[in-house]
Amino acid sequence: METSALQYLTQPSGDYTSDATAADKSLGKDDFLKLLIAKLSNQDPMNPMDDSEFVAQLAQFSSLEQLSNMNDNLEQDIQWNYLLSQTISNTMSTSLIGREVRADSSTLYLETAGDSDIALHLGQTASEVTVTIQDENGNTVRTIKTDALDAGDHVVHWDGADESGAQVPAGTYTISVSAVDAEGEEFSPEQYVEGKVTGVAYRDGMAMLVINGQEIPLSSVREVKEG
């Protein structure tokens, strides 16, 4: 009588728990080949596997082998592309040292007893612009409102003081900007930082440009100026 090796080998034993992971139950190409050999070894000599069934089993194994190889090649390509991207990124970032750049940023670094300019771009005329400044804990330290501003680039000056006029400590602050147009509709201006790249830092494999004392991802750079 033919022994069902496939059923026997794939049937979970009493040591398995009901919450076995999908990875434990998945079959790779080596598992498939072992099962096929086990089935051939345990088949009934008086009733051997039909040739057509055996060919079908081999075809399945061949397909599994090809899919596995394709997956391995894809993973190698992804790793190679990642390394190539990192090399290009590192080379580009160091070449920007000493150059003036403009980059998207919603943060700024304030030095001790210093002030800072907040750069923004308006896509349309605004009847009012509100700049909210928060510390690293998310607390609002200052709110600055401006008069009407035309479309284009603008700078809002912050003297580095909080609402009471006291100088805030040095550190990184988060800036959020909102604007209202002539019809009273609110819109969000673009925020950016502009300055000279004084260095490059690497965080988790990512190149960070040091601009005005703060780290900006290379991917945030939108403009590199001459000189």
Image (cartoon, grey):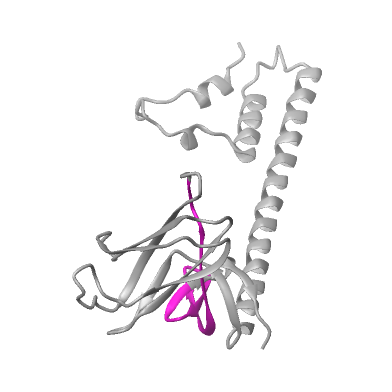
60 or 95: nearer the eye? 95
Residue 141 higher or lower than 159, as above or below: above
Part of the protein shown in magenta: 186-215
Please give the name of the residue rendered at 67% of the width and 25% of the height, measured from the top-left corner. Answer: 40
In the image, residue 108 lies at what x, y percent?
A: 40, 72
Res. 142 image quadrant: bottom left
* Residue 207: percent from left, percent from top: 54, 73
The residue nearer to you, when weighing 6 against 78, is 78
Q: Is residue 144 above or below residue 114?
A: above
Query: Is 189 inside the magenta-drawn segment?
Result: yes
Numbered-mark total: 0
| Residue 132 place in picture, x, y as percent | 34, 60
Pinpoint residue 75: horizontal percent, then vertical percent. Answer: 65, 53
Residue nearer the viewer, 91 or 180: 180
Q: Quadrant of residue 19?
A: top left
Which quadrant does the N terminus fall into?
Answer: top right
Q: Main secondary structure of the magenta part?
A: strand
Vertical order, 96 against 221 (above or below): below
Foreground pick, 175 / 120:
120
User: Which residue is at a point 66% across and 88% down the rendered structure image?
Assistant: 227
Residue 196 painted magenta:
yes
Q: Is residue 11 above or below residue 133?
A: above
